[in-house]
Structures are given as structure tokens and as C-alpha cells.
Image (spheres, rainbow, N blue to C red):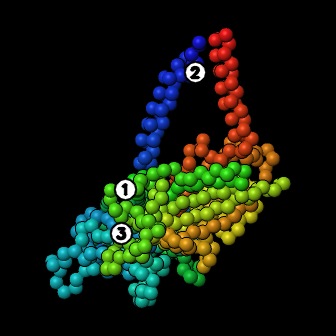
Amino acid sequence: MESVWFSTTGSAVPRVGFLAILLLSLLLCTTFSSTEAYDALDPTANITIKWDVISWTPDGYIAVVTMYNFQQYRHIQAPGWILGWTWAKKEVIWNVVGGQTTEQGDCSRFKGNIPHCCKKDPTVVDLLPGTPYNQQIANCCTGGVLTSWAQDPEHAISSFQLSVGSAGTTNKTVKLPRNFTLKAPGPGYTCGPAKIVKPTKFITKDKRRTTQALMTWNVTCTYSQFLAQKTPTCCVSLSSFYNNTIVNCPTCTCGCQNKTEPGSCVDPNSPHLASVVSPPGKAISTPLVRCTNHMCPIRVHWHVKLQYKEYWRIKITITNFNYIVNYSQWNLVVQHPNFDNLTQVFSFNYKPITPYMGLNDTGMLWGVKFYNDLLTSAGPLGNVQSELLFRKDKSTFTFDKGWAFPRRIYFNGDNCVMPPPDAYPWLPNASSRLVFSLLSTVFGTLACVVMLLT
């Protein structure tokens, strides 16, 4: 019997060798991408921190620090962002408007007026809603919450004002801060060095005069899901009207149930569920997830519901299995080739995501304000759902080979784990052909055996 060979770059390689090379390449690619912050669906995603020096003081300067969330579908939830850096010299912060540092530090060398913060590496947080107006500036006081740029660009900006002392008082003597860090509120963001850019220009309210900052520098921070958490945070399950099979999330997608360690997950049938979820006098920082085979806080279910002569319809259900987290202003990003023929979305907002010219295969969905923009914690009300209606494109539409299911799904900017393609619900005729093919092989083998024996 002849062995099967593959030809690559003009040379013959045995099947086993080819597969070994392929597996090695995939392993290397996976290893490389594990620290990569690049997102193919949002290639320019970043948070830009702009530092505008607007006036000089006797011992330093006053600056407005503005944070822009240029990420299309990743936002910062409560308790909000935490921004830190390291001073280049012995700078201090005399005052903050629209924010505050988390620690004052050692200010014992000062007599009389005491600075707001004397730490070499201060961290600043936003003020809460309801802050007195004399402590606010524009775009402050939202508790550090930033919406994504595609959802609500007006609220994707946050600002605070610093009065910096013991610093330079000219463009040549000011030293840029170093080692910027951004937590939202946990890890995941990596910030580059501060870079001096053209001074920001400001237009007065009457739009008749333009002023500019005395000095401006930018810091760019990018997000990596692999740095943010060791395990995935969401998974996808699938079903269809033409197949009774429900494809659940892969087992242990976000972790496995630890039966030797009580409290690793919550049994929804526990008679003491309320005391487990909210024990008196105890703050819970780790997720309390419902005990499931996948152990993910979020599950997205895609159901191919109906087909008509010229249309087909799907239902999306997002379920929260986390007992202590409400997801406000959640969003879902779905990639599917039929989004270029999306006809109607029921009870969700929709916006196309088109990072590449001429390619419209990705859509962003989020809740309607005051209706379903809040995904509550695990329980009877811990889900949101909607239906999408697509027009059939005769040149591409098919239910065969899993075409009707999404290519990828993101929840709040995190990539959700899809089931393996060979587990997708197949058309009955496809499965029948597969069974017929297997039976044919079996019967043919038996016939050969009988002929040899006779």
C-alpha cells in the first residue's frame, strides 16, 4: 500500500512529518499570541492618556489629564479605572480637581501647606457621582466608568486636573513621568512611555478664539486578555431547529469544579444559597460562579430558530452565572458572514464593526437603555435575549457544515470560547450521508472478509 505524501515548496514530506510540522507551527503561534494585545476586529484599540500643561505656577505647573477610551467594544466597569505613574524628580501634587490620589504619602518635610500627595508613585482614581460642583471639572466624577467608543463616545472620556509642585516651570525643565500603569480595575493594560506631541488646541465656547496647551504629552495603553486573566471569561453554546442536538460549552472552559475545595462554585439548589452569596459582614472579591460543566461567568447561546423563503432568524441569549456581579452597559460582538444582510434586530442596539474596507461581517450588540442594558447577577432574571433577522444571500447561504453559526463572539471585549467545529449541529441529510458512508465502509469490509474466507 502506498503511503500518502504532501508536497511543500517543491519537496515531498510524509504525512506524519507534515502533521508534526503543522502542530509545531500552531504551538509556536499560540505561544507568541499569548502576550499579544492586537485585536483583529479592533486593530487600533487603545486607551490614550493626554497630559496638557495649561499654566505655570511658582514651583511647577497645572495640568489637565484626559483619558480617551478608543476601544470600540471594551469598556471599564465599576469600581473604575486606577491610573498610576512614577515621578521623574521629587514632584508633589498640591491639589487634584475631579479626582483624588489613593494615598497621601510622607509629607513631613513640608511646613504649613501640606500637599495632597507626596508619593513618588501616586495612583489616582475618579470621584464618584454626586461630587460637589466646586470639586468637578468636565468629564469627571463617574466613578471611573468609561463606556466603549462605539456605544457612547461622549462618555468614553474621563478627566482630572493636577497642580504639580517641585517640578520644572518651563518646557525644557519639566520632566515627563515614567512607568505609567492603568488598572480597570484589574490587570490587562500595558502602557508605553510618555511621548511629547503637538500642544492640544482648545476652542472657546463662542468658537471665535483658539488657545493651546503650553506642553502636551501622550501615553498609550493597550489591553491583552491573556494578561487580564489566566482563564477565559465566557463561552458559547449552539442549537438549531433542524437538529435536536444542543451543543453545550466545552467542559472546563473557564475552569473545573474543585470538589475537594468547598466554595469554588455555588449550587443553585442549595437551601442556604442566600447566605453563601452574601455572607454578613464579609466583602467578596472573587467571583461566585454557579456550578456548571464549563464554570464560566457568562454563557452566550446562539440558536438558529427559523427559516423563511428569503430570510432566516436566530435567537441570542446571554446568561450570567456570576452571583455577585451585575454587568452594566454590556456589549456583544459577533462575527458572521451574513451581517452584510442583517435586516432587523429585536430589543438590542446594533452597530456594524468594519475595521477593514469593504468587509461587513461583524456586528456589535448592546442593551436598550432602561430596558435590558443591565445584565443582573445569576438567578431567574440573570439573562438578556434578542432575535436577529437576516436576508438570505443565494450565493452564500447554507445551513450545511455549520455555516449558520458565528465565527467568533466577544462579550465585553473578551473572546468567548466556541465549541469545536466537529460538534456543531449538522443538517439531518448531512448526518444521514455520514452514517450511510460509515455503513458502506463496514459492509464493504465485511464483504471482503467473506470473499477471502471463501
Tell me how far mark 2 sits from mark 1, CA to CA.
45 Å
Q: Amino acid at mark 1?
A: Asn
* Residue 261 image offset from top left, x and y in percent: 32, 59
Quarter of the image containing the C terminus?
Answer: top right
Q: Is residue 56 left or right of residue 251?
A: left
Looking at the rendering, which quadrant does residue 94 occupy?
A: bottom left
Q: Nearer the viewer, mark 2 or mark 3?
A: 3
Question: As displayed, is residue 120 above or below residue 38?
Answer: below
Q: Earlier in the sequence, mark 3 or mark 1?
A: 1
Residue position for label 1: 258
Looking at the rendering, which quadrant does residue 345 occupy?
A: bottom right
Disc 3 secondary structure class: loop
Tell me how far mark 3 sits from mark 1, CA to CA.
19 Å
Residue position for label 3: 285
* Residue 415 image offset from top left, x and y in percent: 52, 54
Residue position for label 2: 6
Disc 1 secondary structure class: loop
* Residue 271 image offset from top left, x and y in percent: 43, 73
* Residue 293 image offset from top left, x and y in percent: 48, 55
Q: Amino acid at mark 3?
A: Ser
Q: Amino acid at mark 2?
A: Phe
Q: Earlier in the sequence, mark 2 or mark 1?
A: 2
Tell me how far mark 2 sits from mark 3, CA to CA.
53 Å
Q: Is residue 195 left or right of residue 331?
A: left
Q: Residues within 10 Å of mark 2 (few under 14, many from 20)?
A: few
